Amino acid sequence: MLDEIHTGGCQCGAVRFRVDGSLGDASICHCRMCQKAFGSFYAPLVSIRDAKLTWTRGAPKKFRSSNFVERGFCADCGTPLTYEAPDGIALAIGAFDHPETIAPKLQWGIEGKLPYVDTIATLPANHTLADTNAAPFLKDLVSYQHPDHDTDHWPER
Ligand SMILES: [Zn+2]
Ligand SMILES: [Zn+2]
């Protein structure tokens, strides 16, 4: 849809993006390079396909992870943001302001899949504030994370 707009950015707010148009395939990639690039078990990525990507604040720093691929990230806070290949750009799903609307539809790189990934959903599950006895600082926590919407100025004040 042409009037579709998606926004997002890094954790600190130095880099913000907007995508005008429909997103392409959403996936997770288990390959070892995506694990490293995201510091995670796998990379959640969505292709921008024919939509228009605009960096509305700052721009990612890039690391060339292979002869064909660059990976963009915030130079200030380290949030992974892009996977840029000859056939197009994909954005990190978790960096969007509304990642809950971008469900992965397929998996790649399963040769690198970590052996415990499939059973994570069966682990004991707790809310963050369930642990205030062991971590009393949580009660007084003040977030410096950029909010999940565009801002005229950041940091605020
Ligand atoms: Zn940042
Ligand atoms: Zn990968």
Image (spheres, rainbow, N blue to C red):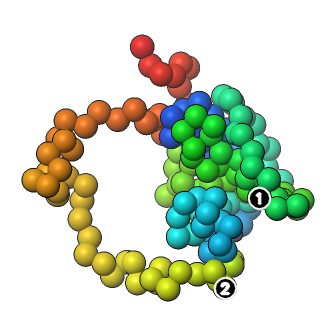
Image check: 65 left or right of 146?
A: right
Instruction: From the viewer's side, name the closer residue of 7 and 64.
Output: 64
Q: Which mark is residue 24?
A: none
- Name the residue beneath numbered marker 2: 111
Residue at image x 24%, y 59%?
127
Q: Which mark is residue 65?
A: 1
Type of amino acid under label 2: Glu
Type of amino acid under label 1: Ser
On the image, the x and y values in percent for residue 11 come to: 50, 40
On the image, the x and y values in percent for residue 52 come to: 79, 44
On the image, the x and y values in percent for residue 113 come to: 58, 81
Distance between mark 2 and mark 1 Cα atoms? 18 Å
Q: Classify 17 as above or below 70.
A: above
Q: Is residue 26 visible?
A: no
Image check: 61 left or right of 99?
A: right
Q: Is residue 109 visible?
A: yes
